Structure formats: C-alpha cells, structure tokens
Image (spheres, rainbow, N blue to C red):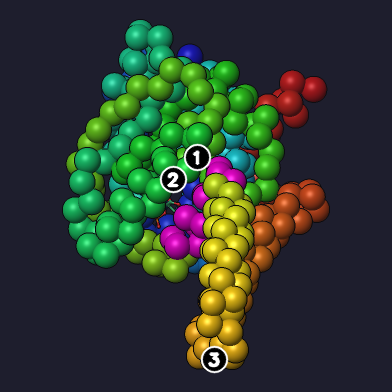
Amino acid sequence: MKLTAIIPCFNEEAALHFFYAEMSKTMQQMQDVDFELLFIDDGSKDGTLQEIKKLAAADARVKYVSFSRNFGKEAAIYAGLEHSDGDLTAIMDADLQDPPSLLPQMYRAIVEEGYDSVATRRVNRKGEPPIRSFFARRFYRLMNRISKADIVDGARDYRLMNRAFVEALLEMGEYNRFSKGLFGWVGFQTKWLEFENIERVAGETKWSFWKLFLYSIDGIVAFSTMPLSIAAFFGVLMCGVSAIAIVFVVIRQLLYGGSAFGWPSMVCIIIFLGGIQLLCIGILGSYLAKTYLEVKKRPIYICKERNAAKKQEKET
Ligand code: UDP
Ligand code: MG
C-alpha cells in the first residue's frame, strides 16, 4: 500500500531536517507501507528548495513541487493532492506540530477500522497568544452556527485520507479554498484523534493575527451566505421601524400640529441608516469579489519546477 505525505513548506529551511529525521523513524516502523514524501515548496525565499533537493538526491522517496511564488498553504495542499497517487494521502506541516508518530494509529483506523479519513484536533492551545485563542474559539462557534460545513474547534489540517476522499477534494477546484470547510463538506466517515498542542520545532509561524483574520473572513464567505441574509434582515427591520415612525409623525401632526423640530434626531437617523447601507453594500461586495475571482478561473498555483508527476500524467 502506498502512502503519500504532502508537506507544505514556506521558509522551512530550519525545520526540514528535523522533520525528515522524525518522519524516517515513523517510516521505519511502518515497514509494510510504501512511502512517498511530497514536499510543496510554496515560493520560499530561504534555502528550503535546496534543502528538499538534497533530501531528494539521497532518498528516492522524496518528491517535490516548487511554486513560482508564495501562493499560500491552501494552494500548496491542492498542488499536493493533485500530485499524490498514493492509496492513502496525508497532509502534514513541516514544523513537526503534526507529529508523524500518530501515523501508524491513523493508518490502522483506515485500513482496519474502515474509516475513509482520519483527522486530528489539538485539545489545547498551549503556547499560543491568549487573544488569538479567544478569537479562534469565537470563529469556530460562529462558523458552525452559520454554515453547513461542520468545522471542529482546534482541528488541524493534519489528516490521512483514502483515494475516494482525495478525489472528492480534487473535484472542488474552487479558487477560494478553505480546506477545513472542504474536508467537512465532502462527507465520508471521519475518525477524530486528539493530541496536545506541540510548539514548532524551528523557525517561526507564518500566520500573523491579521492574516488569520482575513482567512476567517474567507472561510465565512466560502461556506455561508448568512451575512447576505443579515443584510436583507436589516433592510426589513428598517422598513418596519420607519413605518412605525411615519404613523407616529402623522398622528402627532393631527393632534398637535406644526411640529417642525427634531433636527438632531434626524441627523442621527440619517447617519445610522447610511452606516447600515454601507455595511450591507460591503457584505454584498465581498461576495461579489469572491465571485469575480472564481469567474476568472486563474490557476490555483503556478509550478516552477518539480520532480513529481500528477496522477493522470503518470497514467498516460
Ligand atoms: N505554509 C505554507 N504557505 C504559507 C504559510 C504556511 O506552505 O503561505 C506551511 C508552513 O510551511 C507549515 C504549515 O503551512 O508547514 C503551517 O504553517 P505554520 O506552522 O506557520 O502555521 P501554524 O502552525 O502556526 O498555524
Ligand atoms: Mg506550525
């Protein structure tokens, strides 16, 4: 049985040899599995590609795809899935935050217990800034409330999947990719394993708070149309409020007459409504922008060099 491990790498020069050493131990343990390590160099600016090539020269199981620039982890995952032809495919980080030692257990869950995929979640967020954890939790709560893709709090992208699962993911060639949602969306039987958060072995995280914030907006826009309904709801609410106000003004005019005061309150109302209108246009705009990007059908990544072939290339 062949297992392809996809490893997205962006400036991971320092972590790679730790990863390879640790992974080698696991590969040794799993003698009956035919491994392939598929490194995706996501336009790294340091010596990551050279480091990968060194590994590839010494070990025929090492394959790589190198991008022309940084396209992001989601694009790297997609490229990995396209170039994977294993019966099983794993996705794991290069910084050892996704421990290879879980692989045998994940493998058994698919081969012996009959699951289609095995996913992992960390049970705590030790070593992470508290403010980041707080917003991450809020995000998962919100996401599960407003979308169909059920996204587990603390879920990592670390996963082992069978062929059918990978094919299903590849069917979704959308540009705005939010893997955590896609994994849940495709369905199948997934087993969840839990582990304690591990800090990265070397190098530093590629995600700033701002990047994570934008990513969470991507996730919401990709998996929920709830914000659009909220915009419509505001519209209906405001119509209702204005109807009541009109009745009130008319009755007051009939009872007391000549009531030409109330400029400050008028200004407040105008500003308030203007704000709500802009908010709703903004919501609409963010969906339109995503639609625009999808319609252009630009490639998800551009490959500069590689020693791996896509599955269909190997078949023809
Ligand atoms: N990564 C990538 N492209 C990017 C950012 C990150 O391929 O634009 C890779 C990175 O090399 C690592 C994984 O995605 O293997 C997770 O990134 P990181 O460890 O920085 O994220 P964190 O674990 O802090 O969430
Ligand atoms: Mg990490």
Q: Which residue is mark 2?
A: 143
Q: Quadrant of residue 70?
A: bottom right
Report helix, strand or loop for mark 3.
loop
Magenta residues (range) = 212-225
Name the spot of residue 7 as percent of width and height, x first: 47, 43
Within 10 Å of disc 2 (Cα), the crowding (few <14, some 14-19, many 20+) is many
SS of the residue at dot 1?
A: loop
* Mark 1 or mark 3, whichever is nearer to me: 3
| Circle nearer the N terminus (2, 3) | 2
Label 2, label 3: how many angstroms apart (C-alpha)?
46 Å
Task: Give the CA separation, mark 1 to mark 2.
Answer: 6 Å
In the drawing, does residue 90 fall left or right of residue 168?
A: left
For label 3, count other residues whose C-alpha is less than 10 Å away and answer few (under 14), some (14-19) or many (20+): few
Say which mark, if any, is on residue 119. Answer: none
- Label 3 belongs to which residue? 261
**Quadrant, the C terminus:** top right
Q: Provide residue 223's location: percent of width, then percent of height.
A: 55, 43
| Residue 153 percent coordinates (x, y) | 32, 42
181 displayed left or right of 65: left
**Is the C-beta separation of discs 1 and 2 under 8 Å?**
yes
> Residue shown at 54%/36% (left/top)?
182
Amino acid beneath label 2: Met
Q: Does the rendering let one see residue 163?
A: yes
